[in-house]
Amino acid sequence: MRRPAHHAPLPSSISESMGVTITSCGHFLDRRVCQTFDRVRDDYLILTTLEGTAWVEEEGQRRDLAPGDWFLLRPGRVHGYTQVTNWTLVWVHFMGPLCDTLLRSLGLLSRERLRFRQRTHRSRDLLIDLVRNATAGTVANEVLLNARLLELLACVHQDYTLESAGTDHMARVLSYIDGHLGEAIALDDLAACAHLSPFHFARSFKRRFGYTPMRFVQKKRMELAQDLMCVDPDLMVRDVARMAGFEDALYFSNVFRKWSGTSPSAFKEAARELEPRTG
């Protein structure tokens, strides 16, 4: 089982004045066993799945979580989790009167199903950045972490609103890609999502996104691989390759170098240098 990273920032009077308190945050990478029984917390939870599948049960309602899915839990709700396949997730627990006001104003707590997807990776990147910097215990960093959390919630709302406004066939294709990056993806599967022939789908996709469908899939896999190595630079390259949908670690390394201009090992070293230091 991969080593979890869990941070519990020590908030000061600054957080109290801001009305925002981050109580804990962290990640689990490639977790093979994850099960919690019914529990109740007095803070909010927001998490996103990077890889793998799980389900969460909230107040007797079960929600499946796949790659790209987000989940928001309000305080006082009975909930539990069960991992289905190896699960990689990033989360943050938070509380505070400003958080209450913001979530109510954005309408995030009035929605019947609090599992959702995002059209972009802005929210995911903000959450990963928050978790990576949650150990540096300075007043300035505390303010920045709280501000980043507020930005994350606003970003979640913006993308959720766009998604709720209506999805087209290509939006379903993007959702399918995000949910199957760790698996084999065929052009015929993507074309079926768009209700087009493979030929017409490939032309339409390239015209809209600037990439061929399979080139776009490769791009998304490289982004996922970078996210995984940023979250935990100690991950083995072969594990990153598998989680990003590559059976051959050597082939993955060659593709990674073409996309990023550096090797996975060098990228991990650079990510390790950026890890916040404590003490």
Image (cartoon, rainbow, N blue to C red):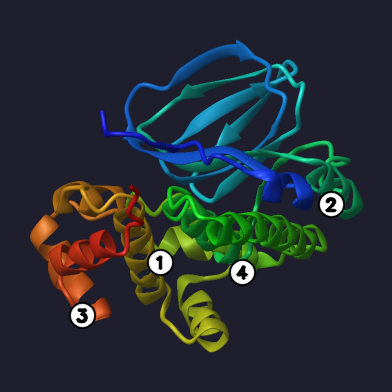
Residue bearing the label numbered 2: 102
Disc 2 to disc 3, C-alpha distance: 42 Å
Query: Which numbered disc, 1 or 4, marks the residue closer to the eye?
Result: 1
Disc 2 to disc 1, C-alpha distance: 32 Å
Q: Amino acid at mark 4?
A: Met
Closer to the chain start, of discs 3 and 4, is 4
Asked if the residue at tag 4 contacts the one at tag 3, i.e. Cβ–Cβ closer than 8 Å, the answer is no
Disc 4 to disc 2, C-alpha distance: 31 Å
The location of residue 38, given as percent across then percent down, is 62, 11
Task: Tell me the SS state at disc 4.
Answer: helix
Residue bearing the label numbered 4: 170
Query: Which numbered disc, 2 or 3, marks the residue closer to the eye?
Result: 2
55 horizontally vs 277: left or right:
right
Residue bearing the label numbered 3: 258
178 horizontally vs 250: left or right:
right
Residue bearing the label numbered 1: 220
Q: Amino acid at mark 1?
A: Lys
Q: Is residue 80 among the parts visible in the rendering?
A: yes
Q: Which residue is located at x 30 percent, y 49 percent?
A: 232
Q: Which residue is located at x 83 percent, y 36 percent?
A: 112
Q: Amino acid at mark 3?
A: Lys
User: Around disc 2, counting alpha carbons within 10 Å, would you say few (fewer than 14), some (14 to 19), or many (20 or more)?
Assistant: some
13 horizontally vs 269: left or right:
right
Q: Amino acid at mark 2?
A: Leu
Task: Tell me the SS state at disc 1.
Answer: helix
The location of residue 196, given as percent across then percent down, is 57, 69
Quadrant of the image occupied by residue 220: bottom left
User: Around disc 1, counting alpha carbons within 10 Å, would you say few (fewer than 14), some (14 to 19), or many (20 or more)?
Assistant: some
The quarter of the image holding the N terminus is top left
